Amino acid sequence: MHNVKIMLSILSILLTVTGCRNSIIQTPVEGLQDTASKDNTSIIIGEGVDTQVGEVLPIYGVWILEQVVLRSEMYSDDITKNGEIIPVDVEDYLGYEVEYAVDFFRLGETTYLNPIYTQSTTTVDNYEEGGRFRLTDNFPSIQEFFEDKKIELDGIEDYVYLGDFPLIRFDVGVDPHIPVGSKCVVLNTDTILVGTWGKIILASRVTTSQ
């Protein structure tokens, strides 16, 4: 009987803590747009594995959208919502800040709560192939872009061929769809590419995650 009482006490504590945590996550915050479902509260890496408590992702922090540096062949940045095509030009967002954090994503002055971050790995060649950058007039291939801008890639010294270099990619899931910032590729601690198709924006870090 004594053991049963102890187990019931522990269960009561766990339920209390869980209830408090959920109430904090799901309580609307003044000035924020709660666009996520109440179940959309975890950060997911790779094959649906929750991140460890306190883990800091390399994209966390504030970034400034500086310039379009790559463009896909026959690109279109338009999005489709409920069967309707909504015209979007990502260049309209140049100069904006984007902020990635554990419990929100911010584009300019609009904040979305409870994003899901999915991490995957690609290579320079695969990123180039998927974006079809090298076939576009007046814009460089991704390898030419790295060379022209003298982009420092963390760990590049371990690779003979630039095309084999692994790039960490993040997909940011929020609802509704965000026009800019939902996909990005990490180049180094202070530089990311925002987008995987259409017009690709170079973004530089302003601050790190608190």
Image: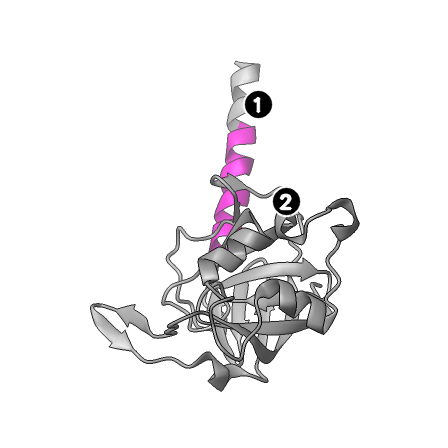
Instruction: Report the amino acid beneath label 2.
Output: Val
Residue, disc 1 = 6
- Which of the pair 94/111 is nearer the observer? 94
Is there any visible trace of residue 17 in the rendered image? yes
Residue drawn at (39%, 50%), measured in percent from left and top?
A: 39
Identify the secondary structure beneath mark 1. helix
As drawn, the label of residue 98 is none
Specify the segment rendered in magenta: 9-25
Residue drawn at (48%, 86%), measured in percent from left and top?
A: 92
Residue, disc 2 = 53
Callout count: 2
- Which of the pair 191/71 is nearer the observer? 71
Residue drawn at (56%, 16%), measured in percent from left and top?
A: 3
Is there any visible trace of residue 100 in the rendered image? no
Q: Is residue 206 above or below residue 23?
A: below
Q: What predominant SS class does the magenta segment belong to?
A: helix
Q: CA distance from mark 1 to mark 2?
A: 27 Å
Give residue 154's position: percent from left, percent from top.
75, 54
Q: In the image, is residue 208 part of the stretch drawn in magenta?
A: no
Instruction: Report the amino acid beneath label 1.
Output: Ile
Q: Is residue 164 above or below residue 62?
A: above
